[in-house]
Amino acid sequence: MSIYVGNLSYDVTEQDLNTVFAEYGTVKSAKLPTDRETGRVRGFGFVEMSDDAEETKAIEELDGAEWMGRTLKVNKAKPRENRGGGGNFGGGRRY
């Protein structure tokens, strides 16, 4: 399971995120997606912990908490949707 962390400060680092979640257990990974054009953090991230009970506790404790001047939105991450792309757009075979 992965945890979605939203409404993050644009100044947050993966190390900051790791430190906060480490209070609730062992953090396997902390990722902060960045904007392709600017390279700036996009304001949300994902955290994976080693144990489901630790993840549940972190979600319960941190959802709605204030951190770095922002109110966090923390919940179970939803599976990434397939945005499509690629595929066969032509009809029939080409010889």
Image: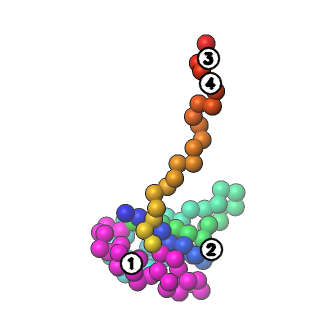
Callout 4, which amino acid? Gly
Label count reads: 4
Q: Badge 2 local density, few (<14 within 10 Å), some, or many (20+)? A: few
Callout 1, which amino acid? Ala
User: Which residue lies under the disc numbered 2?
Assistant: 10
| Of marks 1 and 4, the one in the foreground | 4
The answer to which of 21 and 84 lies nearer the viewer is 84
Callout 3, which amino acid? Arg
Note whether 95 is above or below 31 in the view shown: above
| Of marks 1 and 2, the one in the foreground | 1
Which labelled disc corresponds to residue 94? 3
Q: Badge 1 local density, few (<14 within 10 Å), some, or many (20+)? A: many
| Of marks 3 and 1, the one in the foreground | 3
| Of marks 3 and 2, the one in the foreground | 3
- Residue, x 52% and y 77% (percent of image)? 73
Note whether 16 is above or below 36 in the view shown: below
| Of marks 2 and 4, the one in the foreground | 4
Secondary structure, mark 1, is: helix
Considering the image in quadrants, where does the N terminus appear? bottom left
The answer to which of 75 and 23 lies nearer the viewer is 75
Q: Can residue 17 be seen in this view?
A: no
Labels 3 & 2 near each other (Cβ < 8 A): no
- The Cα–Cα distance between marks 3 and 1, rounded to whole angstroms, is 54 Å
User: Is residue 73 in the magenta section?
Assistant: yes
- Give the colour scheme of this rendering: rainbow
Q: Position of residue 25 (x, y in %)?
A: 32, 76
- The Cα–Cα distance between marks 1 and 4, rounded to whole angstroms, is 50 Å
User: Is residue 34 in the magenta section?
Assistant: no
User: Which residue lies under the disc numbered 4?
Assistant: 91
Range of residues picked out in magenta: 49-74
